[in-house]
Amino acid sequence: MFKLVVPDLISNSYFPAIAAIDLGFFKEEGLDVELELLFPVNKSYEALRDGSVAFVAGSAHSALAAFPNWDGVKLVCAQGQGMYWYLVMDKAHNPRRLDLDCVKGKKIGAAPWVEMGLRRMLIAAGYDLERDDITIMPVPGAAGGQPSVNFGLMAADALQAGKIDGFWANGVGTQVALNSGVGDIIVDVRRREGPAEAFNFTMASIATSDAVLADNPGLAEATVRAMNKTHAALKEDPKRAQDVANKRFPAEQAALIVPLIERDLPAYSTGISENFVAGMNQFCSDLGLLTSPVAYTDVVAEAAIPLWT
């Protein structure tokens, strides 16, 4: 049994990994994979480091929370290309799409490690958080790592309650805010909005440890094959996502999943390019998370590279 953890469950962000379990594609590749929620993402990677889990399906850059300078961890494949969170602002502030000035003087909710993408995106766009009085903060209530935590939904609730002025979170939380009429999308980086370099700050990936790879020859290749099958199945029939969501999500959020998956389909590719790794590592260096240069093959699972499509 291989345990796979996600830091956010009721979400489109890590849905391909969940679907690979529930649609049987891991099992087709001989892998018995069990899903668990472990929030926030740094805790997921700490569990991987400590050997209590085999996979983390989360944000790629966050591996550095537990594996300094990529020592002992490998990205096996992508769940989807590009940084995948949305910047949503309260409609009461009359925000306009792509006008980042609306964040000045505002409080923006974001999860640990997730907030780094927003912070660096704003800096790349010419903003100074102190000068422009921009507060990036935890979402009230989204702390402690309880199994019930789902960050996007909590962010949408906090926005509706007026506890924050905006949030940086997943597509489900974003859609809830849009449907309620309280929020508008300002930037969707995955669709090439905002500073160009932000696209490669991170991605939704599947990671494992060097120790797990050493103990399980062929694991990386089998994981990539399973994820390729998952992407292909969802592209062929996005409605297959509904059965997975019905099993894992409350009914209200399960009803949102098929349009969100359809929106994400263009990003579905398991490949992790050298260009991506260079962009992510520059992002991590700018944050002070990397202290020395790291080669592409020190970040990715080399055995899986020929299987990426």
Image: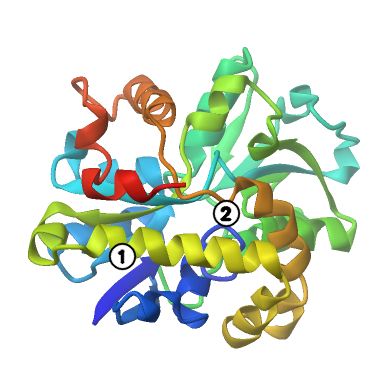
> What residue lies at 20% left-to-right and 48% top-to-bottom?
73
Colouring of the image: rainbow
Give the residue type at disc 2. Answer: Val
Q: Is residue 66 visible?
A: no
Q: Write down the residue under mark 1.
A: 222
Is 23 placed above or below 70 here? below
Q: Which one is closest to the eye, mark 1 or mark 2?
A: 1
Query: Tag 2, which secondary structure?
Result: loop
Q: Write down the residue under mark 2.
A: 139
**Label 1 vs 2, first from the N-terminus:** 2
Left-right relation of 185 to 291: right
Left-right relation of 250 to 102: left
Residue 178 is marked as none
For label 1, the crowd category at 10 Å Cα-Cα, with few meaning under 14, some 14 to 19 and many 20 or more, is many
C-alpha separation, residue under disc 1 versus residue under disc 2: 37 Å
Q: Is residue 134 visible?
A: yes
Viewer-side residue, 112 vs 78: 78
| Residue 213 placement: quadrant | bottom left
| Residue 105 placement: quadrant | top right
Query: Tag 1, which secondary structure?
Result: helix
Q: Position of residue 86 (x, y in %)?
A: 67, 44
Give the residue type at disc 1. Answer: Ala
Is 244 placed above or below 260 here? below
| Residue 241 placement: quadrant | bottom right
Q: Position of residue 280 (x, y in %)?
A: 40, 30
Which residue appears farthest toward the front when viewing the image? 306
